[in-house]
Amino acid sequence: MIISIVARLACAVVIVACITAQATNARAQQRGGTAESDKVQPVNSGPNPYRIIRDWAQLTLEKRPWGGSNGVAIDRDGKSVWATDRCSPGIAPGCLGTRANPVHLFDETGKEVRSFGGGMFVWPHGIHVDRDGNVWVTDARVPTAEERIRFPGEDKKGSVVIKFSPDGKVLMTLGKPGVKGDPPDALTEPNDVVTDPTNGDVYVAESHTNVEDPNLSAVSRCSTGMASSCGSSVRRERGWASSEHRTQSSSIPRAADRRRPPQPQNPNPDEGGEVCR
């Protein structure tokens, strides 16, 4: 009798725990997608007007899981979605040593239409669709010394921006693959790219890693016109940010710096850890 009561209580506890977990996941779906993200409190009390659809797009053409994904853009048709991924899952995804395609097009239902770019990238990052429907993708780093040993022959990849036609034909490459440097010959870890819809100028946000030298952080502007590369028509704005991460342009380019610059030493920080001025 006692054993039966204990068993029933145990079952009741399990049921309550399951219901609680489901409720937590449901709230998380409404807030941001996962139980883990639900731990992050909203910055205001306003309602969330968006509905989360988990696993909306799957890589059905190659039948593989998503690698790390960092770029998404809406096609010129206003419905289809372009996205990049880093070819392999895990805590340190990357495309070296694989032939997986990192550039994907999905229709409005999430069905994969086409993919391309296999064997061309180290670490895909930003993606942009220009006024003509062409697709621009940034490769935000070069192979490390360890990767060059592990993947021989793949050292001439990375730190470039590649312009594709909608069907995957390479139309232009900005930068020198595998080399970090200054334009017009090279780029330093480009994160994102946008084009000006009024004149076709290209803006590239560089410097993915946290650099201390302001001369290594920049947004480069390239007037391409009908040329196949930027040539010498480059203007680089330097020294105002340490890790440009996103760019956006209508007719005025905007860039986001994800990293706060080092603060001057001060023996009297306030209670929140901010430097007193």
Image: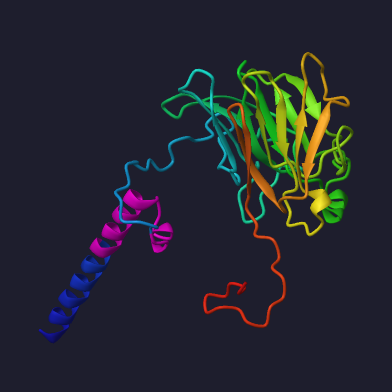
Q: Residue at x 22, y 73 (%)?
A: 13
Residue 172, given in percent of the width and then of the height, sits at 78, 23
Main SS, magenta region, reads: helix
Q: Is residue 216 above or below residue 228?
A: below
Q: Is residue 172 magenta?
A: no
Q: Is residue 35 magenta?
A: yes
Q: Work out whether residue 14 can be spotted.
A: yes
Residues drawn in magenta: 19-41
What is the quadrant of the N terminus in the image?
bottom left
Quarter-wise, where is residue 11 in the image?
Answer: bottom left
Closer to the camera in the image, 93 or 139: 139
Quarter-wise, where is residue 158 in the image?
Answer: top right
Q: Residue at x 22, y 66 (%)?
A: 15
272 displayed left or right of 225: left
Q: Residue at x 63, y 18 (%)?
A: 198
253 displayed left or right of 159: left
Residue 239, given in percent of the width and then of the height, sits at 77, 50
Quarter-wise, where is residue 268 in the image?
Answer: bottom right
Q: Residue at x 77, y 48 (%)?
A: 217
Q: Is residue 154 above or below residue 61?
A: below
212 displayed left or right of 7: right
- Among all residues in the image, which is located at the extreme top? 226
49 displayed left or right of 243: left
Residue 159, given in percent of the width and then of the height, sits at 79, 40
Residue 244, given in percent of the width and then of the height, sits at 68, 47
What is the quadrant of the C terminus in the image?
bottom right
Marker count (numbered): 0
